[in-house]
Amino acid sequence: MILSLKNVSKTFGGVKAVNKCIFEVEENKITSLIGPNGAGKTTVFNIISGLAEPDSGIIRLGSKNITGLAAHKIAKSGISRTFQLTKVFRNLSVRDNMLIAKKASDDEIKRILKSIYFDKPLDTIASELSYGQQRLLELARALLMPHSLLMLDEPTAGVNPKIRQELKTILRNLRKEGKTVFLIEHDMEFVMDISDTVIVLNEGKVLKVGKPKEIVKDRKVLEAYLGK
Amino acid sequence: MIHDFLIYFLLIVLIYTIIVMSFNLAVGFTGLVNLGHMVFFGIGAYASALLALSGAPWYLAVPSSALIAALSGAIIAALTVRLKGDYFQIVTLGLVFIAVTLSRNWISLTRGALGLPGVPPIFKDSLHYMIFVMAVFALSVIFFYWLTNSGTGKIFQAIRDDETASSVLGKNTYFYKILSITISTFFAGLAGSLFVHYIKFVDPTIFDLEFFVLILSMLIAGGLASIQGSIAGVFTLGIFVELIRFIDRVPLLSTVLAQHPELIGASRTMVYSVIVIYLLIFRPRGIFGRVEV
């Protein structure tokens, strides 16, 4: 187990966005966090990565308690992430975007970019890239940063079918390399195809944790999430 | 006379360029719209004047005043950079009013509205002083080019583009924002010191918002996040502003201005306002800017 959440809660005003959330993410696996809109998935991601402070609960990365640490300290502890809405540095070149994550040679940067099918020149300004290419650049940046856990918030949102297919291959390759991936995703076909474990969140609480085959057959999940 | 005017013009342009480059570091490169930037120019001017008037040699007064401005900048930044967007701008604008009030009312230190006259010059003749300022200017340009292309400079730009993304990539954005403001205010203080040793006088009008608007206009005209833009902005607007001095010699206009001499002063503000409005509409990145205003 690389990441564990114990009784993590977060309230915004009167709304309990995350309610005594308990789950674990296993090492060298792909774990998906799913749930209907407003279930608290992104809030959970923000709490883990230090962008939001939990009201209560404990978060551990390996054996280290990272609860309430600043985002940059959590990043240095080994969590790398991307966002639902792409956050590239728009006015910087591809190379500079990558160098913010880690000092690296052009060869190392090119190797990472090639591994995710990104083929634009390093001097291209990020704002000149298509949305799909920007998402790939953000992923490359997250991969370059030294990490033990990679968190991806809706990696397929807004990308074309070709890049979506490439993303599957990329994630499978990462698993082969022994990386741990934790992702939020709405595309059920994508989730069921690549995940080792699926965590279903509903109204801020964990509804079910299991393998994809178990999740699709679970009555509670179907009622809450799939609406059947 | 032309010789004296050219030296005056070059000196002012060089000093203003140091201010605009330092302002650009905060605004253009780091995204911190510090509306109180000229306060640190004033702090540098007052500190240098007070030190020089109390007998400190220039080689102590000039760097010390820049350091005093930088220290003030670091303290203000530590208290304010966590404020987002408009709130940061409002607080830093408030600094201007605090500075004006302090400089007008702390009579024992500043002599209030009377100001501090008789600041000793660094060189007796202005040509030598211009060469000295040119050397400081050249070193400042080299420093800003180096800084903005360094790893730290790229982090400043990353914070400007997306602070959240910078923090999840392990960057302590709070520290880097303080660092940017500290460096920026160091150079504003340095410019203030160079200015006061040339003008030989400082009073609370150094904090006037009109002066700030001129510097802001030069920044916008030259373009954000560009050192060559800062230089071009100051020279372009500087030339226009100085040419306005001779507006009463233009045929036709001379007749009108003879009847309404109050328009001569106002026309200066009007000219750079028109230039900035034109640029904002037709060239929103300014002359060399890399980021839209």
Image (cartoon, coloured by chain):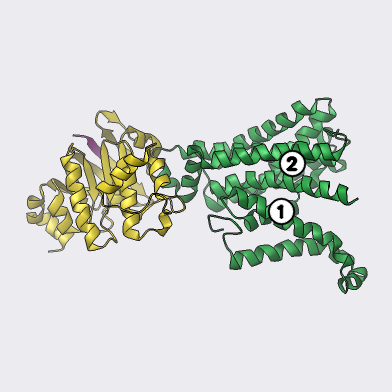
Relative side of A87 to A203, left or right: right
Q: Position of residue B168 (x, y in %)?
A: 38, 42
Residue at (34, 43) in percent of width and height? A109
Q: Position of residue B65 (x, y in %)?
A: 72, 32
Viewer-nearest of discs 1 and 2: 1
> Which chain is depicted green?
B
Give the label on residue A203, or none.
none
Q: Chain of mark 1?
A: B
- Sequence-wise, which precedes: disc 1 or disc 2? 2
Q: Position of residue A132 (x, y in %)?
A: 31, 58
Secondary structure of the residue carrying numbered label 1? helix
Asked whether the residues under marks 1 and 2 belong to the same chain, the reply is yes
Please name the color used to draw chain A. yellow
Relative side of B48 to B24, left or right: right
Secondary structure of the residue carrying numbered label 2? helix
- List the residue tagged with mark 1: B235
Q: Nearer the viewer, residue B170 or B285?
A: B285
Instruction: Say if the magenta span includes residue B195.
Output: no
Instruction: Say if the magenta span includes residue A2.
Output: yes
Q: Nearer the viewer, residue B121 or A25?
A: B121
Highlighted magenta segment, given as a residue range: A1-7
Q: Nearer the viewer, residue A204 or B235?
A: B235
Residue at (50, 38) in percent of width and height? B152
Relative side of B83 to B58, left or right: left
Residue at (69, 32) in percent of width and height? B68
Quadrant that contains the C terminus of chain A: bottom left
Q: Position of residue A178 (x, y in %)?
A: 18, 37
Q: Measured along the vertical axis of the image, is residue B274 above or below residue B102?
A: below
Give the label on residue B42, or none.
2
Q: Amino acid at mark 1?
A: Phe
Sort mark 2 into few (<14), some (14-19) or many (20+) by Cα contacts within 10 Å: many
- Residue B76 is at least partly visible in this image: no
